Amino acid sequence: EVKLVQSGAEVRRPGESLKISCKGSGYSFTSYWIGWVRQMPGKGLEWMGAIYAGDSDTRYSPSFQGQVTISVDTSINTAYLEWSSLKASDTAKYFCSRQSGAGDYWGQGTLITVSS
Amino acid sequence: EIVLTQSPGTLSLSPGERATLSCRASQNVPGTYLAWYQQRPGQAPRLLIYGASSRATGVPDRFSGTGSGTDFTLTISRLVPEDSAMYYCQQYGSSPETFGQGTKVEIK
C-alpha cells in the first residue's frame, strides 16, 4: 500500500527555522517526483515545487523560489520542506504528494503556525 | 505561468442532479496534462481525473472529465451527499504547475 506520512504540527516564532518531512512507503521511492502544496487558512491549493527523488532534480514555483528549500534523503525514503526564516504569512497547511504526473497519493498535511 | 480559472465559484444542487464544473486555462495546456481533485473539509486532496479524462483508481464512474487545449470540464452525473466538497483543477504540463481557485459543490 502506497503511503505518504508527514511530520506533525509545528508552532514557531517569526524568524525561526523549520524543516518538515514526508516519508514514502509501499512503492519505489526513487522513481517518482514528490511535490509540495501550500493551503493557507480558508484558501485554495498552491503548488510550491517538486523534487525527483531519483536524482534530486528540483523545480520551484517562482512564488516560492528562494523562500523554501526542498530536499530528499533516499536512505530513509523521506522528502523535506525547509524554511530558514519563517514569517507569519507562512502559517498554512502543507501537503506532500507523489507525482506520477498528477498527484496520485497525498500525505495527511502538516499544519504550521507562525506567531509571536 | 498558466493561469487556471474555475467557474462557477459555488454550485448548489440536489441529490441526483448533474454538476458541471469548468476550468479555463490562460494558454494551451501541453499534453492535456490536466487533473481534477476533490477536497473535503479537513482532508487532503484526492485525485479524481488525470490526463483530462482518465479516472483515477477507485473513483466512481459518475465522475467524468473532458476537454483539451484551454477548456476543460468535470461532470458529476448523479450527485450524492458525499460529493459535497471543493473541486480543484490543476495543470501539470508546464512548470510551474498551477491550480485553479476551486469550485465549491454544495448538496441541498
Image (cartoon, coloured by chain):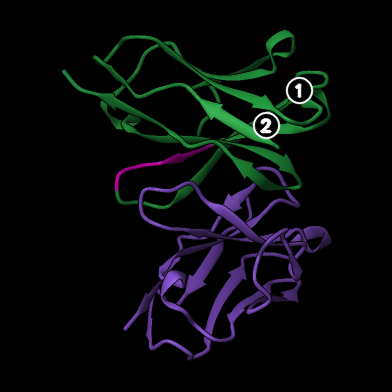
Of B41 and B33, the residue lying toward us: B41
Residue B6 left/right relative to A100: left
Q: Quadrant of the C terminus of chain B?
A: bottom left
The magenta stretch spans which residues? A37-41
Chain B colour is purple
Using the image, determine if residue A106 lies above or below residue B17.
above
Q: Find chain A in the image and tell me its colour.
A: green
- Whether the residues at callouts 1 and 2 have beta carbons within 8 Å, the answer is yes
Point out the residue furthest to the front here.
Answer: A1
Do callouts 1 and 2 point to residues on the same chain?
Answer: yes
Q: Chain of mark 2?
A: A
Q: Circle 1 is placed at which residue position? A: A53
Q: Amino acid at mark 1?
A: Ala
- In screen coordinates, is A46 left or right of A49? left
Q: Residue at x 46, y 60 (%)?
A: B101
Instruction: Identify the residue position indicated by label 2 in the image.
Output: A34
Q: Which mark is residue A80?
A: none
Q: Residue at x 52, y 51 (%)?
A: B45
**Who is closer to the viewer here, B10 or A21?**
A21
Residue B63 in the image: state x and y as whole percent: 63, 75
Q: Secondary structure at mark 1?
A: loop
Q: Is residue A74 above or below residue B43?
A: above
* Mark 2: amino acid: Ile
Q: Position of residue A110 (x, y in %)?
A: 42, 30
The answer to which of B104 and B92 lies nearer the viewer is B104
